[in-house]
Amino acid sequence: MVTGVLPLALEDATKTIQAFLLTGKEYVCLMALHGDIDQPKIEAALNEFVGDILQRPPVRAAVRRDLRKRRIYYIRDVEIDGRQVLFRVGCQAGTYIRKLVYDLGEVLQVGAHMRELRRTRAGSFSESDIQSLYDVLELSQSTGEKREELFRKIVKPMESAFDYIPRVYLRDSAVSSICHGAELAVPGIVRLSDKIYPRTPIALFTLKEELVALSRALMSSEQIMKEERGIAAKTVRVIMPVDTYPRLWKSRPSQTVQVATSS
């Protein structure tokens, strides 16, 4: 019942999958009501679900069925034809649309089920970016310039998965330490996005637009601009291979430790 955008990651780019848990998604849903309801009541019920909602995943789900809060950013482009209701919904990742439809049916007191669902956006990828399996088949059978053209069309740089996540750009001298799991200090920052807040995810980039790591901010944009020292972010997932940039930081001298053993 579900079609549309499904990002797939290859090789080292699998490390970027976590980015899709931090960015929103958009769907076009066809809902079938189990009874006749006036159009104004349907539209009012849809509007009630915009904002923060509490949702328990359905029985057939890949996660634990714990009650959790999710955000519905918008519900628009509503079309109603009898018991068939078509609408576009933008939501936080991890929102179950079929559970949203079920809850709408409960509010309307007639019941409802999801008849069809199409994902029109996942993070920074939309329907304009999608390729079919037939395109992939054509790529596998192509050679020369045609193969190169199809490859660049189908396989995107992994940096594109972070278009909707605030960015921090690093000095070259700080890249290696971040790749080794160090926290990001303020002096290692060259420039950054606005609207960064503590405990929110950020993406660390080199000045050459190369993705380094996924981190969690410990300061806001304003704090980082004002402070001259301190820890600005905690590294969550390193993406760049550790030897990409030269190591410019010094480690402490190693100490020899003797361990006594007994027979």
Image: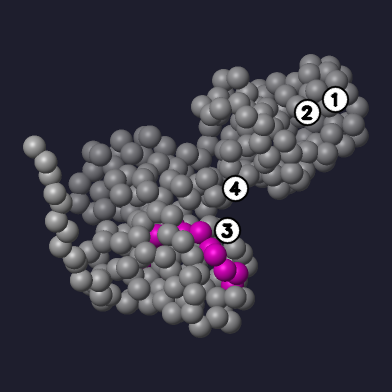
Magenta residue span: 209-221
Label 3 and label 4: CA atoms lie apart by 18 Å
Q: Quadrant of the C terminus?
A: top left
Q: Crowdedness of circle 1 by 10 Å Cα count: few (<14), some, many (20+)? A: many
Q: Nearer the viewer, residue 2 or 133?
A: 2
Looking at the image, is mark 1 or mark 3 earlier in the sequence? 1
Q: Is residue 28 above or below residue 252?
A: above
Residue 164 relative to residue 68: left or right: left
Residue shown at 37%/48% (left/top)?
Answer: 15
Residue 208 relative to residue 250: left or right: right
Residue 170 relative to residue 233: left or right: left
Any part of residue 150 in sight:
no
Q: Nearer the viewer, mark 2 or mark 3?
A: 3
Element at badge 3? loop
Q: Nearer the viewer, residue 146 or 214?
A: 214
Q: Nearer the viewer, mark 1 or mark 3?
A: 3
Amino acid bearing label 2: Leu
Count of number-bearing discs: 4
Picture disc at residue 104: 2
Residue shown at 30%/61% (left/top)?
Answer: 180
Q: Is residue 199 above or below residue 71?
A: below
Amino acid bearing label 3: Arg
Amino acid bearing label 1: Leu
Residue under label 1 = 108
Q: Is residue 74 above or below residue 42?
A: below
Label 1 and label 3: CA atoms lie apart by 38 Å
Q: Position of residue 96 (x, y in %)?
A: 63, 32
